[in-house]
Amino acid sequence: MTKITKSAIAASVLFTGSAFAAQFITIGTGGVTGTYYPTGGAICRMMNKERKTTGIRCSVESTGGSVYNVNTINANELDFGIAQSDTAYQAFNGEGKFEGKAVKGLRSVIAIYPELLAFVVNQKSGIKTLMDIKGKKANIDVAGSGTRMTTEIVLDAFGIKITDLALANELKSSEGPTMLKDNKIDGYFGVFGHPTANIKDAANSVDISLIPIDGKPIDDLVAKYSYYAKGVISKDFYKGVEKDTPSIGVKAVLVTKDSIDEKVVYALTKTILDNFDAFKKLHPAYKTITKESFLDGLAVPQHPGAMKAFKEAGIMK
């Protein structure tokens, strides 16, 4: 796959079978084994099916993920990219890794699917609610990680202190299934696009439960932080889980730049909305999404082209 090194919006001298010149756009994603890459691929396939009508040809690029995509869009070397909603928020506001380097031209297109916080516990632990974590052993992930940040914010919202735990391990969530299996912890936290092999591994080793993370404290967090959104982890994803589990998390957001042609952003957004039922079937992570949920957790201003498509579809006023 050839990398587009200049803004691919510029019309090429090549012509399709339609009456106008083709335009080329590139979507930055993530590693080929993750969820971002097939998501970008799904969008491009839909766009390319419509290219005789739109004149737009789409290609997908495997990248280093959220931060890389935002920076590369800002450098006019990508037209679109997928990024976590909290990363997009930090970039637009010049916070975190973007401190002093705010990307004020960053724009949201759609919030594709949720990456939800999961609290995975051994059923033998006796943990039924989040409040039951007091006096238990849990893994809260490494300092500075997205999981750790979200976990601390959620626990604080419920009035739970890290010191309320009997033990707070600080290892990567990837270590969670092994620690649970070896009875070193009662449960662990992780922010994932669901379903994930991580929790499947845990469920194949011990009888697990997913603890609901909901209620007024979560409503208040969503109202306070624009990059958070509520979602549901389907019971069909993991062995032994009998009920859908509500939670909170970030969204995988398709982002672009304010300088990208409104007609191009409109065409891409309209294509996804018009083909929503087919799109939803393309990956298990899309199981719980709706057209309305595309607007939850956008975190930064939406591009006018996307807004036009949502308004025409009757989803936005």
Image: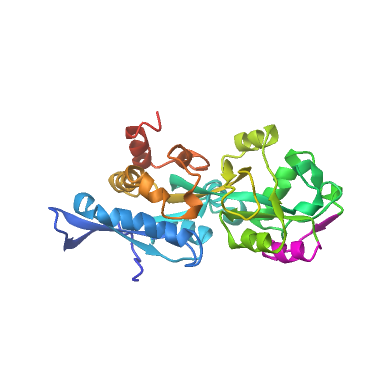
Task: Please tell me whether residue 212 belongs to the stretch shown in magenta.
Answer: no
**Where does the C terminus fall, quadrant-wise?**
top left
The residue located at (51%, 63%) in the rendering is: 34
Residue drawn at x 78%, y 47% as measured from the top left: 127
Q: Residue furthest top?
A: 317
Membership of 175 in magenta stretch: yes
Residue 298, horizontal then vertical, whole percent = 50, 42
Q: Is residue 74 left or right of residue 120?
A: left
- In front of the other: 10 or 188: 188
Observer able to see residue 72: no
Residue 195 placement: quadrant: bottom right
Magenta stretch: give its range.
167-184
116 sits left or right of 39 in the view: right
Residue under the point 47% across and 59% down = 36
**Res. 284 visible in picture:** yes
Question: Looking at the image, which is closer to me, 72 or 224?
Answer: 224
Compared across the picture, whether 305 is left or right of 147 comes to left
User: Where, quadrant-wise, is the N terminus in this rendering?
Assistant: bottom left
Q: Foreground: 289 or 182?
A: 182
The image shows residue 191, relative to residue 62, as above or below, that is above
